[in-house]
Amino acid sequence: MNKTHVIEHLRFALEAQLTTAKVAAKTAHDTATHEENIAENKYDTLGLEAAYLAQGQAQRVNDCYKSIELFEPVFNEKPTDKIAIGSLVCLEDDNAAQKWFYLGPAAGGLTVNVKQHSIAVVTPGAPMGKQLLNKQIDDEITLTIAGKVHEYVVVEIL
């Protein structure tokens, strides 16, 4: 796995999220300020609802900018023996199936595909992120998801 390619894909995915959020915010703003959405009586809440949506979409744009800002210094981190923010990690389960994770400062749940590998971003606040932090190669990780125990071994840290 080439960490540089993963970072390029993450940058592209973060920029794509920002672009999508900007379009949604513009659409919501246009809807909220359109003359057809002016309240005709006190029970007409369409304009108010559109304004709340526009506010939420604007916040999403701000969150995307913040994520991009938080990732920039992390993308330049050098690999270490222990998993830290900025580490690309490969875990292996009991069946030798491998899963890749990128421990990021934000954007948990974002997934990118690089050369037939799916890489999920996890944050230190997520259960998987908490388990990964400071682990080394050959350390074990145990997670319980929906009552089922999943065990993994750290096999690679980039």
Image: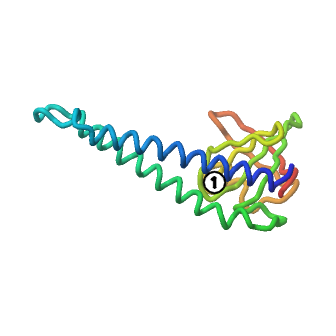
Residue 80, by quadrant, is: bottom right
Please provide percent x and percent y for residue 158. Answer: 83, 58
Would you call the spot at circle 1 few (<14 residues within 10 Å), some (14-19), or many (20 or more)? many
36 with respect to 121 (left or right): left
Q: Which residue is mark 1?
A: 123
Colouring rule applied to residues: rainbow
101 with respect to 153 (left or right): left
Residue 104, by quadrant, is: bottom right
Q: Residue 95, relative to residue 7: is it above or below?
A: above
47 with respect to 129 (left or right): left
Q: Nearer the viewer, residue 124 or 138?
A: 124
Please provide percent x and percent y for residue 89. Answer: 79, 52
Residue at 82%, 36% in the rendered image: 116
Please provide percent x and percent y for residue 110. Answer: 63, 44
Give the amino acid at mark 1: Thr
Residue at 80%, 44% in the rendered image: 152
